[in-house]
Image (cartoon, helix red, strand yellow):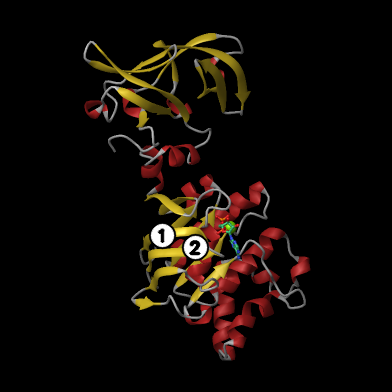
Amino acid sequence: MASVTLEGVTKSFAGLTVVHGVDLAIAEGEFMVLVGPSGCGKSTTLRMIAGLEETSGGTIRIGARDVTQLEPRERNVAMVFQNYALYPHKTVRENLAFGLKMRGADKADIDRRVNQAAAMLKIEPLLARKPRQLSGGQMQRVALGRALVREPDVFLFDEPLSNLDAKMRVHMRDEISRLHREVGTAMIYVTHDQVEAMTLGDRICVMKDGVVQQVGRPLDVYDRPANTFVAGFIGSPEMNFADGEIAAEDGRPVFRSGQLAIPLDGAPQATSLRPGPITLGIRPEHLTPSPSGFAARVHHVERMGAESVLVLDAGARIRALVDRDDGIGEGDEIRLAVPPNRLHLFDREGRSVGT
Ligand code: ADP
Ligand code: MG
């Protein structure tokens, strides 16, 4: 078991910098998720930790060891990829044992580790099968098993569930969580899927364009996003944004954007607000029908089963997440309110104001 520390880790390909000075400390036993849109540098960062990609600058430590210049096999990390890359002509048992055999482990030790991993992943009945006799979910279990038998200091995952169907993905997510609790080793998990990030991570690290935007516990990031990018990326349906002005009316701050006026007293940052341009953010689930709210017209309704998304015109196009039985339909004129402590305010650079 070990911690992982990145200090100023940078990567350039042919002069183009794709990872910009990443500082990140993953504690011993922690589950850290790197999350962000495709191309933001998640895999490159992970591959530098694994040693599959050289760094262009900065330092990587595993525990107290500086591993920046070490070969992958000297780092004692195990990586699981989206593509399982199992040996097609070997049985599951041989696939699990192969890496250990190549490292010269003795037979008794290999058997012990393979049997233990197979038990943990509940794949004992599959040990004699070949990969083509396995489902996608089963293959991914074997790929996990191959990492487990290594008994590494750190597990690295690069979108391991992307090839699975939605139901299997949810199932394997739970399995990986359970595995983490059982082995207690640090895990660094890359995904573009914010739901996966929120549900798996002890903490999440949100990246954009090779730059870390925010690191924190999932709900802290959700409740207090550092900027409009994080606010929009984490959460579904996405946060509503409206550009406008803060006006002082009777000495109290009010957000104004065209027809829309929302009082800001009671907002988390209310005391520090000065008149001027501002971006207001409201999560769809924080908008509720209320006679004292602002006016909006229902453009259409997306019915999702338990809940419905109201797509509304309120000067700007906004979305509200409501109970399916609210009885609101297309064309209705309604009023919506939001608790002031749920308002998010961002400056014109998109940075959260006051938090
Ligand atoms: P992510 O995993 O977040 O989708 P990557 O780390 O794979 O992103 O890629 C980050 C950026 O680096 C992308 O713009 C990608 O095109 C570029 N990149 C990745 N690997 C290479 C490479 N071997 N050569 C040149 N550019 C690369
Ligand atoms: Mg990637």
**In the rendering, at what x and y percent does residue 13 appear?**
55, 64
**In the rendering, at what x and y percent does residue 336 appear?**
44, 15
Q: Nearer the viewer, residue 331 or 21?
A: 21
Question: Which residue was labeled with disc 1?
Answer: 22
What's under tag 2, amino acid-wise? Thr
The residue drawn where x is 56% and y is 25% is 309
Mark 1 vs ligand 1: CB below 8 Å = no
Mark 2 vs ligand 1: CB below 8 Å = yes
Q: How many marks?
A: 2
Q: Residues within 10 Å of mark 2 (few under 14, many from 20)?
A: many
**In the rendering, at what x and y percent does residue 162 appear?**
63, 54
Along the polypeptide, which appears first: circle 2 or circle 1?
1
In this view, the residue farthest toward the front is 15
Q: State the quadrant of the N terminus.
A: bottom left
Q: Nearer the viewer, residue 306 or 352?
A: 352
Q: State the separation of the CA atoms marked 2 and 1.
A: 8 Å
Q: Are marks 2 and 1 in contact (CB under 8 Å)?
A: yes
What's under tag 1, amino acid-wise? Val
Q: Which mark is residue 45?
A: 2
The residue drawn where x is 57% and y is 91% is 104
**In the rendering, at what x and y percent does residue 30 appear?**
39, 61
